[in-house]
Image (cartoon, rainbow, N blue to C red):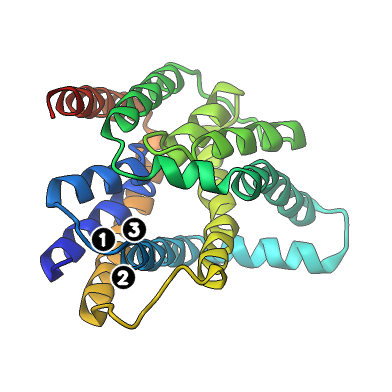
Amino acid sequence: MSELDALLLGIIQGLTEFLPVSSSGHLELGKAILGDTSLPSESLLFTVVVHFATALSTIVVYRKDILDILKGLFQFKWNDDLKFSLKIILSMIPAAVVGVLFDEEIEALFNGNILFVGFMLIVTALLLWLADKAKDTNKNVSFPNALTIGISQAIAILPGISRSGATISTAVLLGIDKTKAARFSFLMVVPLILGKIAKDIMSGDITTTSSNNLVLIIGFISAFVAGLVACTWMIKLVKKSKLSYFAIYCLVVGLIAIGVAYFQ
């Protein structure tokens, strides 16, 4: 992987982790377009690095909220902070279970399967279109809501299903305030990303002996900066109900991916 490829893929990851267009799907499409020929272990290391960068950008943007969550966990008082912390934990369970039980099956889907990514992007487009039509409310996330949103996050492990798109859309369709839906969506993914990174590192599948450190640094910085921009931008877009634009984008890219897969 060249430095330019790392820059482009880092930007793709940083933007699409927060914008509802599927970061995993776009990374697969990006690698296919750029002709990524790196070894699986090197490709996995790069993926881990850029995911850590986007997790860090979330922590920076929501640093106050994350501190409140941590305080809620350790205060042991049944207050709003503790309730919100428990809702975040509850939302993580479905994706954690799926990740542990179906790890090999999921990894098999991340193998340049452009046709599958295309169809899943169309599913994402439908979710975003439905959410964009939902009415504004002031409803908070309840415990049952947190579990339902968590199930959406588990489904969004599939490449082409946008995690933020699926979770925000599900929350909005449940009647939750759009700003609160975006906040919950971005906060609930941080522990999962960090957990997945730890799992990949401990698995022994990642090797650093033949890795280009400059490529990793460029990927990390570009993903982090793009993540900061996208996270802040997405919060504003959700408030203004602009999800239909992303629905059109996902539909177009999904159809193009399907077309490319059929004509290859």
Q: Nearer the viewer, residue 33 or 174?
A: 33
| Residue labelled with disc 3 | 227
Horizontal placement of 71 versus 187: left or right?
right
| Residue labelled with disc 2 | 220
Closer to the chain start, of discs 1 and 3, is 1
Quadrant housing the N terminus: bottom left
Name above or below for residue 205 compared with residue 133: below
| Residue labelled with disc 1 | 10
Q: Position of residue 152 (x, y in %)?
A: 57, 33
Mark 2 vs mark 3, foreground winner is 2
Q: Secondary structure at mark 3?
A: helix
Name above or below for residue 94 compared with residue 120: below
Horizontal placement of 94 versus 42: left or right?
right
Q: Position of residue 177 (x, y in %)?
A: 56, 32
Instruction: Place residue 20 in its image quadrant.
Output: top left
Residue type pointed to by label 1: Gly
Q: Residue furthest right?
A: 77
Q: Position of residue 208 (x, y in %)?
A: 36, 79
Quadrant housing the C terminus: top left
